[in-house]
Image (spheres, helix red, strand yellow):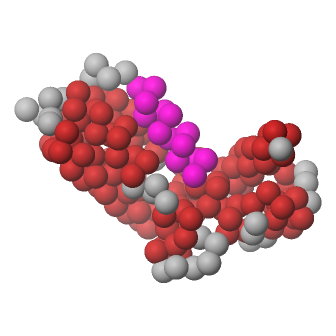
Amino acid sequence: MKGQGAARERLLTAVVEHLAEHGLADVSLRRLADAVGTSHRMLIYHFGSMEGLLVEVVRAVEARQRALLASLPPADPAAAARAFWRTLTDPALRAHERLFFELYAQAARGRPGTTPLLDGIVTDWLEPVAAIQRSLGHPPDVAEARARLGLAVARGLLLDLVATDDLAGVDAAMDQFIALMTGP
């Protein structure tokens, strides 16, 4: 079983890297399998379906983003937030952001194979962001509410970016939001 988990992780890493480089245009399970050096049957074996694979891709990218957030120096929350935002808006991640919103909408509508994406899609982010808010002196209930607000604003601005490609506009909006959240 341990070998199967390692094989699954290797495949997932290869798929994430491939999609980051090439995007999702005209992707099929067979083409994706060929691109990462495996068979479509192995992808189905490990992930169940194309939807299951894409859900795991989104989860993997989000886990990397949470790890990055945790690694930022807490001494200056505004600078850390701006650095994190720059990472999220990196053009290399645009395909992943589009995928996130596509799958999020499908999962919210109950499309089979995508609904597991909803497990933890908000709650996995609340504690790491609430910890930052607590470090700013907010009590736990306020810190959690501000974490949820921050997640909603970040996702809203990322959706804006995917729809408009107006990086300057979303950056200006996020700068204002960070100032509101970290200011006196």
Residue that sits furthest to the left in the current view: 184
Q: Nearer the viewer, residue 100 or 170?
A: 100
Q: Is residue 102 above or below residue 23?
A: below
Q: Is residue 180 magenta?
A: no
Q: Position of residue 44 (x, y in %)?
A: 82, 65
**Helix, strand or loop for the magenta stretch, by majority:** helix
Reply yes or no: does residue 61 show up in magenta: yes
Q: Is residue 118 above or below residue 174?
A: below
* Pick the front one: 164 or 75: 75
Expressed as whole percent of the image width and height from the top left, the position of residue 27 reads 75, 67
Q: Is 125 displayed left or right of 16 in the figure?
A: left
In-front residue for pair 4/33: 4
The quadrant in which residue 7 appears is: top right
Residue 57 appears in the rendering: yes
Residue at 7% in and 32% down: 184
Q: Residue at x 34, y 29 (%)?
A: 80
Name the residue furthest front: 1
Q: Where in the figure is residue 115, as x and y percent of width and height?
A: 55, 70
- The reply, left or right, for residue 116 in relation to residue 160 is right
The residue under the point 28% across, 39% down is: 130
Q: How many marks?
A: 0
Where does the magenta region start and end? 59-72
Q: Is residue 175 visible?
A: no
Residue 63 location (% of width, % of height): 54, 43
Q: Nearer the viewer, residue 149 or 81?
A: 149
**Is 26 left, or right, of 175 in this rendering?**
right
Instruction: Residue at 33%, 51% (x, y): give it.
Output: 151
Screen quadrant of the N terminus: top right
**Residue 150, above or below 129:** below
